[in-house]
Image (cartoon, rainbow, N blue to C red):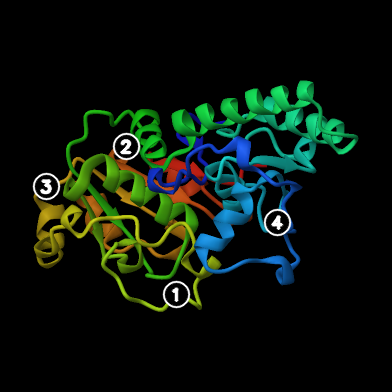
Amino acid sequence: MSRQLIPISFSIPEGRLEPLDIENKTQLLSTIVPGRFETYIYPEKKYYEEYKKSFFARTHKKGGWDCMRHYEILACGCVPLFTDIEAAPHKTMTHLPRNLLFEARELYEEMTRGITDENMEKYKILCRQFRFHTEQFLTSRRMAEYVLSMANARGSKKVLFLSGCLSADYLRCLTLIGFKHLMGADCHDYPKLSHLYKDHNMDLGGMWGKGITYEHNIEQSARDNELDSTVEDDIRARKYDIVIYGSYTRGMPFYDLVREHYPADKVILLGGEDYPLKFEPYINNGHYYFLREIY
């Protein structure tokens, strides 16, 4: 793999992490079944409550291997029951703790034969291990730090985060949330992804997942709206240390202008589609490319 082709995963905003409440769980397996829409629960509060009261919750490959559901289960202090984890490509979902996912599947089979003090203690340990891993590696802030580290850009003070469309894209939205939590207004999103901000009143019924988990995560104070009017001049002046395209397949505004004024290794492309993407031309141009699905 090229050093500039780097795996990346979805993440969970820190504010969505629910307190661990193992003692008050009431059902072994969540009633939510991936792919069976009649089992889906809305709004977000009830959706999270269903996972919180469950010891385990089913998850598996859907459109892509990396799935928002994995992180929502973990955020609720529930243990993912990943039915087909052994088939997942090794360069995809690299941030998830596969060893714990295998342990979880074995423990679930044991607990279906009866819950005992011994396997309950195993569950508590496993659940806490998942929470530790989630806090250390799977939050959106941690993912933003990972991007900066892997792109040799840890010292960046200002970031321009560009989008070619305003519709929901999990990888772009979650990674931007992470940069906002990490850098505040020093990460400028253009155009503004309004559904991510806490003060929005948009109807997200037509967006992926109806906005669950990714909407209402950013304070308005984390954005300087006046920077919208100077974005092209600021690119020319290299106001920002790096430029990130949140979804290169969905549009790359100002790309020619960015290429004219920024070194190639100061441009980062994110690819969050469910299928393998073409990336060679961009790597040949010297950009860092973060890909969700690598087979």
Mark-to-mark CA distance, 1 and 2: 36 Å
Tag shown at residue 265 = 2
Disc 2 residue type (three-letter): Asp
Residue 92 in sight here: no
- Say what amino acid the circle numbered 3 marks: Lys
Q: Is residue 182 visible?
A: yes
Distance, label 4 to label 2, CA atoms, is 33 Å
Residue drawn at x 51%, y 78% is: 206
Residue at image x 9%, y 50%? 237
Exactly how many numbered labels are in the figure? 4
Mark 1 or mark 2: which is in front?
A: 1
Q: Which residue is mark 1?
A: 204
The kind of secondary structure element at disc 1 is: loop
Q: CA distance from mark 3 to mark 1?
A: 33 Å
Are the residues flagged by discs 4 and 2 in contact, CB closer than 8 Å? no
Dot 3 or dot 4: first in sequence order is 4
Question: Looking at the image, which is closer to me, 12 or 255?
Answer: 12
| Helix, strand or loop for disc 2 | helix
Query: With respect to residue 187, does 201 lie above or below?
Result: below
Instruction: Work out whether mark 4 precedes mark 2 in sequence or the reverse, and give the earlier one.
Output: 4
Between discs 2 and 3, the one toward the N terminus? 3
Q: Which residue is mark 3?
A: 239
Residue 24 on image: x %, y %: 62, 42
Q: Which mark is residue 62?
A: 4
Quadrant containing the N terminus is top right
